[in-house]
Image (cartoon, rainbow, N blue to C red):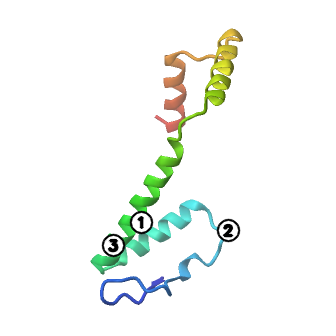
Amino acid sequence: MLETDCSNDYIDTNIRFTTFKNLNMDIQTKKMQFIEEYLRITDEGLLNKLSELLRKERQKSLQAALQPMTQDELSDKLQRSEQDIETERIYTQQEVEAYMKSRRGA
């Protein structure tokens, strides 16, 4: 259970996540437990802060993924791509679509 001391619309620094005792639990279990705790929250200020934290973390991840390549990295990638084409390590659009469908279980 998520224990908090939320008064005057702030989050106390003594938040304890007692439901996350087992550090070895799988990610899906952690997600489900977090969702259950999130659904129990009645403090709108806390909900807003958690939503803002999630938004900021997603934005950081996106920014990190969008870092431009250096000229050397771009040249290396181009060279590998050309080698893939020469050795016929390529896929048609239909092959890629079929693969993606099989991955989704559709």
Q: Is residue 105 above or below residue 16?
A: above
Residue 40 appears in which quarter of the rendering?
A: bottom left
Q: Which SS class for mark 1?
A: helix
> Residue at label 2?
24
Q: Position of residue 43 (x, y in %)?
A: 30, 80
Q: Is residue 46 above or below residue 70?
A: below
Mark 3 and mark 2 lie on one chain; the one further toward the N terminus is 2
The residue at 65%/12% (across/down) is 85
Query: As drawn, is 45 to the left or to the right of 59?
Result: left
For badge 2, the amino acid type reads Asn
In the image shown, does 9 or 106 lie closer to the viewer?
9
In the image shown, does 68 or 55 lie closer to the viewer?
68
Q: Position of residue 52 (x, y in %)?
A: 36, 65
Q: Residue furthest left?
A: 44
The residue at 63%/20% (across/down) is 78
For badge 1, the amino acid type reads Leu
Q: What's the CA distance linking mark 3 and mark 2?
A: 27 Å
Query: As drawn, is 97 to the left or to the right of 73?
Result: left
For badge 3, the amino acid type reads Leu
Q: Position of residue 81 (x, y in %)?
A: 64, 19
> Residue at label 1?
53
| Other residues around mark 3 within 10 Å, as few (<14) / some (14–19) / many (≥20) | some
Mark 1 and mark 2 lie on one chain; the one further toward the N terminus is 2
Q: Position of residue 58 (x, y in %)?
A: 45, 54
> Residue at label 3?
47
CB contact under 8 Å: marks 1 and 2: no
Query: As drawn, is 12 to the left or to the right of 41?
Result: right
Q: Which SS class for mark 3?
A: helix
CB contact under 8 Å: marks 3 and 2: no
In the image shown, does 57 or 67 lie closer to the viewer?
67
Query: As drawn, is 7 to the left or to the right of 57?
Result: left
